[in-house]
Image (cartoon, rainbow, N blue to C red):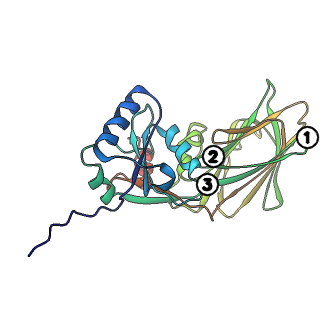
């Protein structure tokens, strides 16, 4: 006698998150009706419906939990997302390829002496808060490399974040598996010809803010902002893994490569 057994899928418990737009909410309702849903905390995989903003929020929410995140584009920007198509979702999840990325860890010290830590998946940004340019001193692994940078700001990016704000500031695009971090100035005034540096991803970057009272500066880890900082230390957090799932042929490495050729 033959027994009929249902096919097993790679992920049995799926949770669906929406960015909150009407388009994303409609897609979420349809997917829940088709596949059911579970609490995201207990899910085997989380499907995020929206744009890159929602993907970053979801990755931050599950930071350090090794929970796979599969994004489907229901927003304006979708570099980190897969194309939306619902009926074959389980099969797409079965075939999805995983990309492992690591966040940056930022420790910012404020004028009041408070120490604040935050992680960034794309970049840590040092940004002027007033009409005056920021004045910064940069050390790498405890050794001063630039005594004075006058600029609108400064970025330390991850490879996955190299195509975001870093690229807009004319920083280099990095392959996902590059063991490097771009250090990119924003509108550098002095030294006028300094275009930044490529650092090993084991480096500890220390930025001291000069004339902080006169030239206030904020430090931003993705969407988390700390104002009136006097010192920022940034390093890659190799211990924390973030798992992004993409359809075959559309991995992050493939997308980064396409970005370099303008398509």
Lower sequence index among marks 1 and 3: 3
Question: Local crowd at mark 3 within 10 Å, few (<14), some, or many (≥20)?
Answer: many
Question: What is the number of the mark on residue 103?
Answer: 3
Lower sequence index among marks 2 and 3: 3
- Residue 79 sits in which quadrant? top left
Residue 65 visible, this orientation:
yes
Q: Secondary structure at mark 2?
A: strand
In the rendered view, does 1 fall on the left or right side of 69?
Answer: left
| Towards the viewer: 190 or 164 | 164
Q: Secondary structure at mark 3?
A: loop
Mark 1 — residue? 112
Q: Secondary structure at mark 1?
A: loop
Q: Position of residue 160 (x, y in %)?
A: 53, 51
- Residue 74 sits in which quadrant? top left
Q: Quadrant of the C terminus?
A: top left
Residue 84 visible, this orientation:
no
Q: How many marks?
A: 3
Q: Position of residue 143 (x, y in %)?
A: 83, 60
Q: Residue at x 51, y 53 (%)?
A: 41
Q: Residue at x 35, y 35 (%)?
A: 29
Distance in Å between CA atoms under marks 1 and 2? 25 Å
Mark 2 — residue? 123
């Amino acid at each position: 006698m033959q027994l009929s057994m249902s096919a097993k899928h790679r992920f049995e418990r799926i949770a669906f998150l929406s960015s909150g737009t009407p388009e994303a909410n409609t897609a979420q309702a349809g997917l829940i009706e088709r596949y059911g849903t579970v609490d995201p905390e207990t899910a085997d995989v989380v499907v995020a419906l929206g744009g890159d903003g929602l993907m970053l929020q979801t990755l931050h929410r599950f930071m350090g939990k090794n929970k796979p995140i599969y994004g489907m584009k229901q927003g304006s920007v979708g570099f980190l997302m897969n194309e939306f198509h619902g009926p074959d979702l389980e099969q797409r999840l079965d075939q999805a390829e995983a990309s492992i990325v690591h966040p940056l860890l930022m420790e910012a010290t404020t004028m009041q002496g408070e120490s604040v830590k935050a992680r960034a998946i794309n970049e840590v940004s040092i940004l002027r808060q007033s009409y005056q340019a920021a004045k910064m001193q940069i050390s790498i692994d405890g050794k001063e490399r630039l005594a004075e940078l006058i600029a609108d700001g400064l970025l330390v990016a991850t490879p996955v974040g190299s195509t975001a704000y870093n690229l807009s500031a004319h920083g280099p695009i990095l392959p996902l598996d590059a063991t490097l971090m771009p250090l990119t100035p924003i509108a550098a005034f002095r030294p006028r010809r300094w275009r930044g540096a490529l650092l090993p991803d084991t480096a500890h970057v220390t930025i001291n803010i000069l004339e902080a009272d006169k030239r206030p500066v904020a430090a931003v880890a993705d969407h988390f902002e700390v104002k009136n900082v006097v010192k920022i230390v940034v390093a890659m957090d190799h211990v924390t893994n973030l798992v992004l799932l993409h359809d075959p042929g559309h991995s992050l490495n493939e997308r980064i490569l396409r970005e370099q050729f303008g398509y």
